[in-house]
C-alpha cells in the first residue's frame, strides 16, 4: 500500500510539472508535439548553412536534429538516418517529420509538420528557416512520406 501511495504522489507531481504552459520550463520530460513546434518556431529566420546544426545556421536535418534534441529526443544527423530511424505514418500530425526527394536522392530533405498542410524547415543555400506549404507544387511532387518519433 505504501508503494502505491508513493507512486501516486510521484505521478501527480510529474503531471503538475508537465502541465506548464511555458515549454521552456518542462525540462524534466520530453516535449509533446506542440512543444516541438514551439521550439522550431523560435528559429524562424535562422540562415541556412550547409552542414549546420546550431542556431548559427542549419541545414535541414541539422535543424530537425537540433529542435528534437532541445525537446529531449535524439535523432540521427542525416536526413536518410532520420527517415530510417523513425516509424512511418500515413497522415502527418503536428511534430512529425515530412520527407522529400531532391536532386534524384531518395531522401534529400526533411521538415517538421506544423499542421494545416504546412511545415517548417531549413530550405536551401541563401534562404532562412521558414514555413512552407505541402500543397506547393514542388513539395507536393517531391513528398515521399511522413515519419514520427511519437508513440501516440
Image (cartoon, helix red, strand yellow):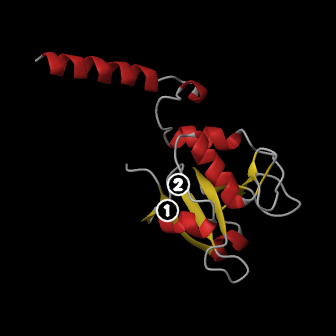
Which residue in the protein does label 2 denote? Answer: 96
In the picture, the quarter occupied by the N terminus is top left
Q: Secondary structure at mark 1?
A: strand
> How far, Cα to Cα, is label 2 from label 1?
6 Å
The reply to whether residue 115 is in sight is: no
Residue at image position (43%, 50%) is: 150
Looking at the image, tell me whether mark 2 or mark 1 is earlier in sequence order: 2
Indicate which disc residue 109 carries.
none
Quadrant location of residue 15?
Answer: top left
Q: Is residue 16 left or right of residue 96?
A: left
- Taking the view exactly as shown, the residue that stands out farthest to the right is 126
Q: Secondary structure at mark 2?
A: loop
| Disc 2 residue crowd, few under 14, some 14–19, many 20+, Cα 10 Å | many
- Could you say where residue 71 lies in the image, as x and y percent from the top left? 56, 40
40 and 13: which one is in front? 13
Q: How many marks?
A: 2
Q: Are marks 2 and 1 in contact (CB under 8 Å)?
A: yes
Residue at image position (61%, 54%) is: 112
Residue at image position (61%, 74%) is: 107
- Could you say where residue 81 lies in the image, as x and y percent from the top left? 56, 66
Query: In this rendering, is residue 18 above or below 74?
Result: above
Which residue in the protein does label 1 denote? Answer: 147
- Could you say where residue 130 lies in the image, as x and y percent from the top left? 76, 52
- Could you say where residue 77 lies in the image, as x and y percent from the top left? 62, 60
The reply to whether residue 151 is in sight is: yes
| Disc 1 residue crowd, few under 14, some 14–19, many 20+, Cα 10 Å | many
Residue at image position (57%, 29%) is: 23
- Taking the view exactly as shown, the residue that stands out farthest to the bottom is 104
67 and 118: which one is in front? 67
Amino acid at each position: 500500500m505504501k508503494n502505491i501511495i508513493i507512486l501516486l504522489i510521484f505521478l501527480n507531481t510529474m503531471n503538475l510539472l508537465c502541465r506548464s504552459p511555458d515549454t521552456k520550463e518542462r525540462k524534466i520530460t520530453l516535449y509533446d508535439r506542440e512543444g516541438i513546434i514551439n521550439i522550431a518556431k523560435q528559429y524562424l529566420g535562422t540562415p541556412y548553412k550547409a552542414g549546420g546544426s546550431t542556431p548559427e545556421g542549419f541545414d535541414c536535418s541539422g535543424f530537425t536534429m537540433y529542435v528534437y534534441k532541445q525537446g529531449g529526443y535524439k535523432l540521427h544527423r542525416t536526413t536518410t538516418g532520420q527517415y530510417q530511424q523513425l516509424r512511418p505514418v500515413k497522415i502527418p500530425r503536428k511534430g512529425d517529420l515530412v520527407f522529400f526527394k531532391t536532386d534524384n536522392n531518395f531522401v534529400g530533405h526533411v521538415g517538421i509538420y506544423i499542421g494545416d498542410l504546412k511545415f517548417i524547415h531549413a530550405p536551401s543555400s541563401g534562404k532562412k528557416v521558414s514555413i512552407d506549404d505541402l500543397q506547393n507544387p514542388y513539395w507536393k511532387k517531391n513528398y515521399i512520406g511522413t515519419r514520427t518519433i511519437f508513440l501516440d
